[in-house]
Amino acid sequence: MTIDINGLSLKELKDLQSQVAKAIGSYEDRKKKEALAEIEEFARAKGFSLAELTGVTVARKRSPAVAKYANPADSADTWSGRGRKPRWFAAALAAGKQPDDMAI
């Protein structure tokens, strides 16, 4: 493929430059994915996962926590039991309530 770049305008040259940069990026991405697939297949053939061989674990995404406790004054105000206790929960405990009293 031959392009006569001397006959192109500045705008056409910049568009061509942008297209070339995108093509290079996508080419590198494709080659990386192909190499990774080959390496994973080789590891599987040997009875290992790629994570076992490299020591790198894939971070898993957590799903949102399910609410376990509800505010007695406002049932729409809930808490999953994870993280810092909400003020209403701490106040209810200080008032003598048990966590089971606020369980959903």
Image: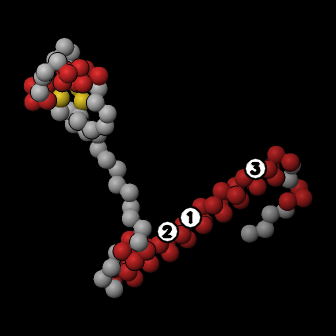
Query: In the image shown, does 34 or 69 lie closer to the viewer?
Result: 69
Separation of disc 1 and disc 3 at Cα?
21 Å
The alpha-carbon separation of the residues under discs 2 and 3 comes to 27 Å
The residue beneath circle 3 is: 15
Which mark is drawn over residue 33?
2
Outermost residue, left direction? 101
Q: Calculate the distance from the C-alpha at mark 1 to the C-alpha at mark 2.
A: 6 Å
The numbered disc on residue 20 is none
* Residue neighbourhood size for the residue with mark 1, other residues' Cα within 10 Å, grouped as few (<14), some (14–19), many (≥20): few
Rendered location of residue 57, percent (x, y):
38, 65
Q: Work out whether 83 lies above or below 98.
A: below
Say which amino acid is labelled 3. Asp
Give the residue furthest to the right.
6
Q: Secondary structure at mark 1?
A: helix
**95 vs 42: above or below:** above
Tell me whether the residue at label 2 lies in contact with that at label 3, contact meaning CB atoms closer than 8 angstroms.
no
Residue 21, above or below 11: below
Q: Which residue is mark 1?
A: 29
The answer to whether the residue labelled 1 contacts the one labelled 3, judged by CB atoms less than 8 Å apart, is: no
Instruction: Of the two numbered discs 2 and 3 on the same chain, state the one appearing first in sequence.
Output: 3
Q: Nearer the viewer, mark 1 or mark 3?
A: 1
- Name the foreground residue: 40 vs 54: 54
